[in-house]
Image (cartoon, helix red, strand yellow):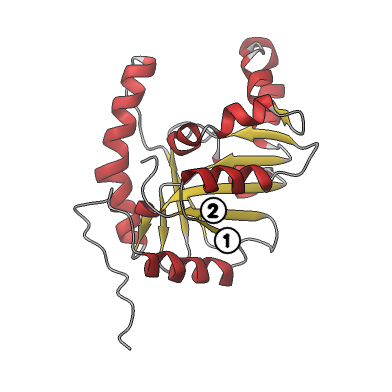
Amino acid sequence: MSAITLERETSSFATPATDEVVETTATALRARGFEVRIAEDHAQARDLVLGLIPNGSEVNQASSRTVDELGIGEAIIERDEYVALKPRIWSMDRATQGKQMRQLGTTPDVMVGSVHAITADGQIVTASASGSQVAAYSGGATTVIYVVGSQKLVPDLDSAFQRIEEYVFPLEDARAQAAYGMHSVINQLLIVRGDRPGRTSVVLVKGSIGF
């Protein structure tokens, strides 16, 4: 049997990966200490993410098109099983409660979000303008849950950086201008190469979602 081809066309970073690449990447992620679940569709992805959140947890969510498209933020707010931190943070005064806002945002029980690329050998890459999710992802949150469309699976770190620069950033820049009237910028890049077992879960979604 021929080896699985992991290379992808770098000109089409919106194209979903094959099922073989999804399975191979899942194996690589598990070898680095990540818990991995594979969702066949968006509905299953939503259910898997919500099912990973322990009852009673204080939950924050990163700004994420993927999370928004799945309706996970609304579900966290609506469900009595969790304490949603985002509405609390939004209600606070940054001028007088900035420290408390940062503490709530970066050290939740559970942080839910997405990333911008995952390499074939299981390295997870996130770009950020503000760094608001970086601290929680890298160590601040007790538990991290990533939900990631298969179009974000790339061969290596060079492809991950190319995907961010050439595909993700123009879309995020346009979104920021429409939402906030200002350009975005890539100020921080986080590469997570592994984690202690049980801390970080990755839900890989077959097909495309987010950008």
Q: Is residue 157 visible?
A: yes
| Label 1: how many Cα within 10 Å (few below 14, some 14–19, many 20+) | many
Residue located beneath label 2 in the image: 203
Of 46 and 145, which appears nearest the observer?
A: 46
User: Which secondary structure lies at badge 2?
Assistant: strand
Of 39 and 87, which appears nearest the observer?
A: 39
Q: Looking at numbered disc 2 in the image, what kind of residue is underneath it?
A: Val
Q: Is residue 183 above or below residue 133?
A: above
Residue located beneath label 1 in the image: 36
Q: Residue furthest right?
A: 56
Q: Which mark is residue 155?
A: none
Q: Quadrant of residue 7?
A: bottom left
Q: Looking at numbered disc 1 in the image, what kind of residue is underneath it?
A: Val
Name the spot of residue 64 as percent of width and height, x first: 47, 35
Q: Is residue 102 visible?
A: no
Is 181 situated left or right of 99 in this image? left
* Contact, mark 1 vs mark 2 (Cβ under 8 Å): yes
First in residue order: circle 1 vs circle 2:
1
Q: What residue appears at the point 71 percent right and 29 percent down from the top-left corner?
A: 79
| Label 2: how many Cα within 10 Å (few below 14, some 14–19, many 20+) | many
